[in-house]
Image: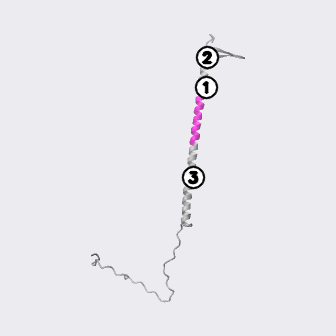
Amino acid sequence: MDGRGGLCRIESPGRAEEVDVATRGRDRQTREQRERARTYAARVELHQRQWRRRTRDNVIALVVGLAVILGAIGAQTAYFVAGPGAPEPAPSTTPTAPATDAPSTPATDAPATPAPDATETTAP
C-alpha cells in the first residue's frame, strides 16, 4: 500500500492494477447484499410454487373424492333399482269379483266381530 490515500497495487504476472481498499469492502458488501436478495427471491418463489402445488393437489383430491362418492351412490342406486338387489314383484292378493249381472249387496255398518264387554275379565 502506498501513501496515496488507500490505494493498493496488485501485481500478478501479466497484470497490474490499483484497487481502492475502501471500494473492496463496499464491493464485498454489495456482493453479499446481492446474494442475500437472490436467496430471498429464490425462497419466495419456492414458497409460491409450493402454495400453488398444494392448492392444485387439494382441488384434484376434492374432484376425485366427489367422483368416488357419486360413483358409489350411482352404483348402489343401480344395484337396488335394477340389479340383483331389486325387490322381486309380489303377486297381487286383491280378490277379483266374479263377473255376474247380480247387484252387489251394500256393506253394512255393523262390525263383523262383537266388541268385548268391559265387565268381563280374563285374568285369574
Kindly check if marks 2 and 3 are in contact, taking CB atoms under 8 A apart as contact: no
Give me the C-alpha separation between circle 1 and circle 3.
49 Å
Q: Regarding mark 1 in the picture, which secondary structure is present there?
A: helix
Return the residue at label 3: 64
Residue range corresponding to the magenta coloring: 32-51
N-terminal label among 1 and 3: 1
Residue 123 shown left or right of residue 73 in the figure: left
**SS at mark 3 in the image:** helix
Q: Are marks 1 and 3 in contact (CB under 8 Å)?
A: no
The residue positioned 64% from the left and 14% from the top of the image is: 8
Q: Which amino acid does label 2 sit on?
A: Val
Compute the Cα span from label 2 to label 1: 16 Å
The label on residue 21 is 2
Q: Earlier in the sequence, mark 2 or mark 1?
A: 2
Q: Position of residue 67 (x, y in %)?
A: 57, 55
| Residue at x 63%, y 17% (from the top left corner) | 20
Query: Which residue carries the number 1 mark?
Result: 31
Identified by mark 1, the residue type is Arg
